[in-house]
Amino acid sequence: DYKIMSAEIDTTADGTVRFAGRNRRRWWGVGNQITDPYDVDKSLREAHLTFRYETRANDLLLLSDVDQVDGAGITHSTRVYDTRPSRFNRSIIKVEAGQPEMELGHCGTRWTPHQPGQMLEFFQHVSERVAGDLQINTAGALRNGGMVFAAALFDRKVKILDCEAVDMYLTFLTSIYGATITGLTGIQVECANTAEYFINQDTPRVTYSHGKALDVRAAVDAIGLVDIDAVERLLNRCAVIPFDANQRAGYFENALIGDRAKPERTIERRRTDMKLERVINPAYKKWDRESTQLREAYQDGPGQELPSRRDTLLGAWSAVTDFCDHRRRSTDAGRGAQALIGSGPDSIRSIKRRALAAVYQLAA
């Protein structure tokens, strides 16, 4: 089905969608129903998240020339083909009921899979420590099973002043293409697009690489007691901190370049005739374009007309998030990769970290 494929939802061998939600109407009526959202194990089975990842060595094809002497004493060179398991390159296999189902990608010998089944353990431990009730709202697999997620909904909304009320989800997402992320979000993950938005967000989260096995108890400890009241207090504090145009300009500049020097408008370049000329600096053009995009995100981004956003720190913070998620020049895959593994000072991940650090400092 084109609609299912366009959303990158995975299916089982018999065509059943690997997705379940409390609302059965999702995915044009083919999504599976979560019948008891408080039963994590049952909800994940209803989403058909019953497979696991395994890694297997790839065979290398080796070619060598072997000299052989025939009966007449003439030496002949013969090419010999042989195979040997690779020490460095391995395949990532999706396995269902003990049977290999599909090769999803390749990895090195140090790559360790984080299993879909570990979501069950994660949410079971979290449910013992959460302030309030938590229920599974959506769960599924994307990109042939290379990415799996589950989102649990809190039983209360986060209210910002008297003009916004936001559902909050605790989401667990693991991907063979990037890291494993657990964290709070106001976005309900249910497809590839919403998964990318969650990956790109700068809300409280913990990220784990595949360099070692996932310690689920440590992941729960890192999150601690999920305190919706603390999230609500931070957002409401940001919504009442006045933030004028000059302050926004400084906040946006810090988010874009941090403590690096602002790019000069022009630079010298040597022409083909070896004479020097001054031209517009490409780094300046990029900074100027992105500064304009940030101002536009503040002016006309979703929800920016609300009193909680207009001329406030929350509005400036929301503009940075909107810019990174939707406006910055990049492909969707590029934005997702930058958010997961980007480490350079110009990456989306770094921009959001600087913006969030400034928010905590200003709201202290």
Image: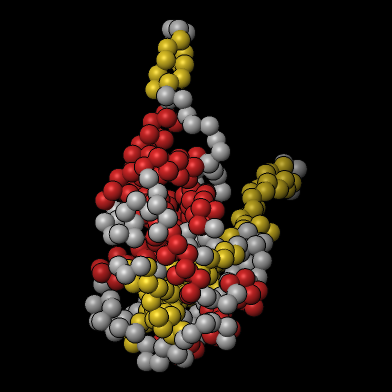
User: For the point 40% across and 92% down, which residue is it?
Assistant: 36
Residue 207 at x, y percent in the picture: 57, 64
Say how many tags the image has: 0
Give the image quarter of residue 275: top left
Give the image quarter of residue 225: bottom right
Seen from the viewer's position, the closer of residues 36 and 64 is 36
Q: Quadrant of the N terminus?
A: bottom left
Residue 114 at x, y percent in the picture: 58, 72
User: For the point 35% across and 67% down, which residue is it?
Assistant: 161
Q: Is residue 143 visible?
A: no
User: For the point 39% across and 22% down, which residue is it?
Assistant: 280
Residue 95 at x, y percent in the picture: 52, 77
Q: Is residue 313 visible?
A: yes
User: For the point 38% across and 76% down, which residue is it?
Assistant: 157
Q: Is residue 82 above or below residue 17?
A: above
Seen from the viewer's position, the closer of residues 245 and 263 is 245
User: On the rendered structure, is 252 left or right of 358?
Assistant: left
Residue 56 at x, y percent in the picture: 61, 68
Q: Quadrant of the C terminus?
A: bottom right
Q: Is residue 285 above or below residue 231?
A: above
The colouring scheme, among rainbow, by chain, secondary structure or one colour, is secondary structure
Q: Is residue 31 above or below residue 247?
A: below
